[in-house]
Image (cartoon, grey):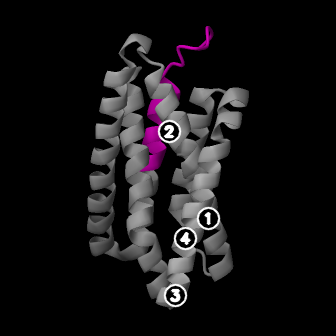
Amino acid sequence: SVIACLLGGLLAKATWQGVLSYGISFYRVRFELSRDMASYLLSGLALVFIAAVLVSSWFIDRYGRKTVTFVSFLLMAVFSFFYTGLGLFWVSVAVFLVMGVVSGLRRNASQSLSLEQVPLMRGSMMALSAAGDSLGSVLGAGVGGFAYGLGGYGLMSVVLGILGVVSALIIQVYALDPTITEN
């Protein structure tokens, strides 16, 4: 379960980092978004992410760490699959911003689930989780860039989405929430 949480978190972070790394460039190229509007979009993404982080404890308390982690990983993957394929700017932006909300939920739920795996070693789990996030960032930016180079934004979003689906499946199948007696 510890390894599942760390690996699932790493792959989910890779999905999110790929979206962060190339999302704004996608909007600049596809919809000819100005630099000013792109910066507003990125600022909006940061705001919805922060808001989601702030309310995430309500979702985690209500639905559980594992459930929120799984659902947020899966939703992020699904949205990643198709935000670059939507032809309408505002619909694509709405999906992009919803990904920011989902990623805020993902961050806290995943971290919380990881930290509860070995309660006596929370410090070590926090360090491992942070290292996994950093590795996920490198993986997401690298794999996303490689996929973009091979087939453009469409292939990139599919590859990042696949990483997200794999992360959700790892959590669903292998992770346990130690704070719940029935897993």
Circle 3/circle 2 CB separation < 8 Å? no
Residue placed most toward the observer, 20 or 89: 20
Circle 4 or circle 1, nearest the eye: 4
Of pointers 3 and 2, the one earlier in the residue sequence: 3
Report the mark closest to the observer, 2 or 1: 1
* N-term-proximal mark, 1 vs 3: 3
Q: In which quarter of the image is residue 50?
A: bottom right
- Place of residue 35 in the rendered image (x, y in percent of width and height, measured from the top left): 47, 88
Count neighbours of disc 4 (C-alpha within 10 A) and say few if under 14, some if 14 to 19, many if 20 or more.
Answer: few
Is 37 positioned to the left or the right of 7 in the image?
right
Mark before the other along the chain sequence, 4 or 1: 4
Q: In this view, does 133 lie above or below 64?
A: below
Residue found at x 44% / y 40%: 167
Q: Distance between the residues labelled 4 and 1?
A: 10 Å
Q: Label for residue 168?
A: 2
- Residue flagged by tag 3: what amino acid is it? Asp
Q: What residue type is labelled 2?
A: Ala
How many marks do you count on the picture?
Answer: 4
Coordinates of residue 32 in the picture (x, y in percent): 50, 91
Q: Is mark 4 on a helix, strand or loop?
A: helix
Q: According to the image, label 3 marks what residue?
A: 36
Labels 4, 2: front one: 4
Q: Which residue is drawn at 51% across and 60% down?
A: 80
Q: How far apart are marks 2 and 1 (CA)?
A: 20 Å
Residues packed near mark 1 inside 10 Å, few (<14), some (14 to 19) or many (20 plus): many
- The range drawn in magenta is 163-183
**Mark 4 / mark 2, whichever is N-terminal:** 4
